[in-house]
């Protein structure tokens, strides 16, 4: 796909959007779908998901070219800030869905009669970026692990697509929902991504909402009550979470699990493997 850079204030006509849709490669469609699913993703996260078949320098070169084309077409929007680290260029940038990307996905959804929701993030602050990218990283690691091991990532939805009616007129609002399966076993998880920014009373109220959901006899995705995986940045924060959960009513001890961010995928797969071998 060869696309000239469009001025930011120039709206692409419908005919041009349709022509662009016909020119997109499968990889480019997949990238747009991923960013729509996650709301934000870094260049290196996109590379790990969609360029894993390439090796060496060609991997970063092709990733740069593809992301540049999507940005020039206003399908993706790089944020003004960069993530930390020594990465350069498009690998270090954070990407959101741009106006044309939103229109492309809406066009494809209408043509396929899909129910997929298309969303662009609202005003973006530093805390939102950090929280969203941590959730995105969980998804990326799950995909990578599923490629190497014998389990399937059946579904992953970030908020707000992960939200679920609570049975009392409101919503359960996890940061993500996921399901993984191996053989005939499927595990369902709601995920709370913690960055150590919320006070204990706020945490308690959030966790009690899940207890109330169980008490009301409600079922979540898959017609089950998903367990709640709370991921945290440090062992000290893990201890805080464990203390809060220990003081909650039944079935808190069975419903919640608290792990470090980097241990989340290992925990999910270990729980699935344990169930599959019981």
Image: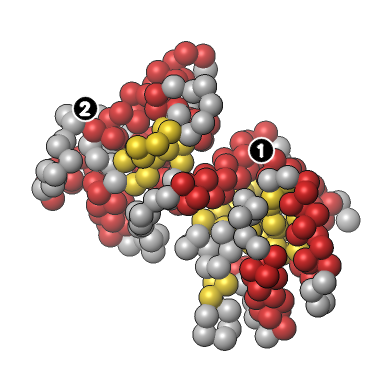
Residue 43 at least partly seen? no
Picture coordinates of residue 136 (x, y %)?
53, 45
- The residue sitting at 45% across, 29% down in the picture is 92
**For numbered disc 1, what is the local secondary structure?**
helix
Res 78 visible: yes
Does the CB distance between marks 2 and 1 fall below 8 Å? no
Viewed as shown, does residue 36 lie left or right of 204? left
Give the residue displayed 18% in from the left and 41% down from the top: 8
Q: Nearer the viewer, residue 84 or 40?
A: 84
Q: Quadrant of the C terminus?
A: bottom right
> Based on the displayed image, in which of its 4 quarters is residue 173 positioned?
bottom right
Task: Judge whether 222 appears above or below 257 on screen.
Answer: below
Q: Which residue is mark 1?
A: 145
Q: In the image, is 145 to the left or to the right of 274?
A: left
Q: Quadrant of residue 29?
A: top left
The residue tagged 2 is 2
Residue that protrudes farthest toward the right in the picture: 278
Q: Is residue 68 left or right of residue 273?
A: left
């Amino acid at each position: 796909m060869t696309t000239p850079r469009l001025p930011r204030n120039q709206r692409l006509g419908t005919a041009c959007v349709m022509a662009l849709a016909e020119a997109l490669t499968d990889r480019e469609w997949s990238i747009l779908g991923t960013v729509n699913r996650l709301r934000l993703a870094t260049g290196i996260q996109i590379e790990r998901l969609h360029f894993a078949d390439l090796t060496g320098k060609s991997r970063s070169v092709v990733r740069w070219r593809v992301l540049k084309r999507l940005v020039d077409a206003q399908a993706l929007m790089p944020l003004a800030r960069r993530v930390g680290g020594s990465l350069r260029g498009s690998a270090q940038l954070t990407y959101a869905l741009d106006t044309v990307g939103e229109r492309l996905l809406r066009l494809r959804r209408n043509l396929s009669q899909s129910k997929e929701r298309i969303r662009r993030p609202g005003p973006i602050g530093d805390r939102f970026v950090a929280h969203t990218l941590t959730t995105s990283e969980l998804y990326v690691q799950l995909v990578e692990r599923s490629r190497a091991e014998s389990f399937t990532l059946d579904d992953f939805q970030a908020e707000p697509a992960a939200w679920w009616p609570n049975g009392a007129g409101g919503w359960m609002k996890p940061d993500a929902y996921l399901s993984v399966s191996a053989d005939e076993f499927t595990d369902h998880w709601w995920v709370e991504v913690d960055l150590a920014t919320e006070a204990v009373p706020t945490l308690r109220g959030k966790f009690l909402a899940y207890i109330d959901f169980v008490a009301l006899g409600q079922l979540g995705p898959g017609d089950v009550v998903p367990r709640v995986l709370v991921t945290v940045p440090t062992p000290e924060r893990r201890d805080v979470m464990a203390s809060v959960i220990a003081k909650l009513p039944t079935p808190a001890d069975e419903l919640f699990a608290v792990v470090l961010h980097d241990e989340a995928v290992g925990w999910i797969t270990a729980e699935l493997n344990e169930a599959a071998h019981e």
